[in-house]
Amino acid sequence: MARPAIAVIDLAAIRHNYRLAKKLTKSAQAFAIIKANAYGHGAVKVAKALEPEADGFGVACIEEALELRGSGIKAPILLLEGIFTPDELVIADHESFSLVVHNQQQLDSLLVAKPKNKFKIFLKIDTGMHRLGFAPSEVKALWFALQQCKYIESITLMTHFARADEINSDYTLQQLQQFKAAVHGLEAPYCLANSPAILAWPATHTEYVRPGLMLYGASPFIEPHEAAAQLKPAMRLESALIAIRDLAAGEAIGYGARFRCEAPTTVGVVAMGYADGYPRHAIDGTPIAVNGIRTRLIGRVSMDMLTIDITGLNCKIGDRVQCWGDQVLATEVAAASHTIPYTLFTGVTRRVPLTYKA
Ligand SMILES: Cc1ncc(COP(=O)(O)O)c(C=O)c1O
């Protein structure tokens, strides 16, 4: 007796995808990016599933890092945006968090800090994302300033790619070139590749990589891609039919009467809506599967329900529906909703219980 909407998280799939990242990068140090509650998959569960083999984890802020330490995760944890306020350095020191350093304020705090342990830092260089990081022209001066600081154990040089998911753009290679020119002559490891770069841009594979989306089994590319085809979807967003009705040609379904039946149509009502994280902007025809058979969304998604075409499928109330997972890829639903799988995964709301398969 429970609402049938659930998300089933396949931890073995996440381990498989992590291993694929390692294999493609010839065993680079791979920091599994598990910010935003592991892209909606449950950060602690994902960290525990990966900890025996993961080289470390990446999160967006100290609160996310503390949640992991609090649950017993001992592996290295990198704060991808570094500290937000100087007092966080004390916590980072105590908990041995590695830090991205992307601006002068963070650098100033670091240079005057007297930590108990030395920091491992990732110096972020802006090579074209134009969001965080120091200008390439500043890198050498910063490097030499950091060499003087006795509380720094290691410096890794880092950048982030803006268009690695665009296979036909050379922007990633331009960024790589900018990076190499900026760091030329400095003896340090590099940390460059996100998921699309791991999957499609081998020239970016260096000592450290940062797989995020690919861990969860979704392709970052619009077009089919050979390496991405080896990923295993880790989240199955499921629910069930709660009502069935037969409509005549010409009758309309749901808010705004967006879909009007062209022919006699059997409509299945599914307990899944935008308040669960299913995208409201999904168009008529968005793929969805019932009893393992792919069909289509028809009618506007409402808060708690959506409607699908089950004409001729012989369905009954209670039949299982997969919104995304292995039968319908999150990437397909994203494409039909003018969004990306990142927002689908992180948008699953707390009304949907996460259940885990080891
Ligand atoms: C700095 C940084 N590195 C790595 C990632 C992981 O990216 P992806 O999920 O595309 O692998 C992100 C994600 O936004 C990021 O901000």
Image: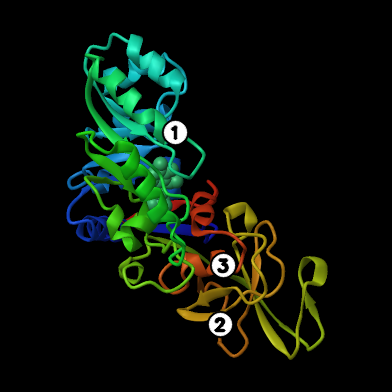
Say which residue appears at 33% left-offset and 73% top-offset. Answer: 226
| Spatial separation of the CA atoms under disc 2 and disc 3 | 27 Å
Q: Foreground mark, 2 or 3?
A: 3
Dot 2: what SS?
loop
Q: Which mark is residue 205?
A: none
The percent position of residue 146, horizontal first and vertical second, equals: 29, 20
Q: Is residue 175 visible?
A: yes
Dot 1 or dot 3: first in sequence order is 1
Say which residue appears at 60% left-offset and 63% top-offset. Answer: 271
Q: Is residue 216 left or right of residue 117?
A: right
The percent position of residue 229, horizontal first and vertical second, equals: 34, 71
- Location of mark 1 (residue): 135
Q: Residues within 10 Å of mark 3 (few under 14, many from 20)?
A: some
Dot 1: what SS?
loop
Snapshot quadrant of residue 246: bottom right
Q: Is residue 355 visible?
A: no
Dot 2 or dot 3: first in sequence order is 2
Q: Is residue 345 left or right of residue 184?
A: right
| Spatial separation of the CA atoms under disc 1 and disc 3 | 34 Å
Dot 3: what SS?
helix
Looking at the picture, which amino acid does disc 3 mark? Ala
Q: Which mark is residue 335?
A: 3
Whether 103 is drawn above or below 263: the answer is above
Say which residue appears at 67% left-offset and 84% top-offset. Answer: 266
* Nearest the eye: 344 or 167: 167
Q: Foreground mark, 1 or 2?
A: 1
* Nearest the eye: 137 or 62: 137
Looking at the picture, which amino acid does disc 1 mark? Ala
Dot 1 or dot 2: first in sequence order is 1
- Location of mark 2 (residue): 315
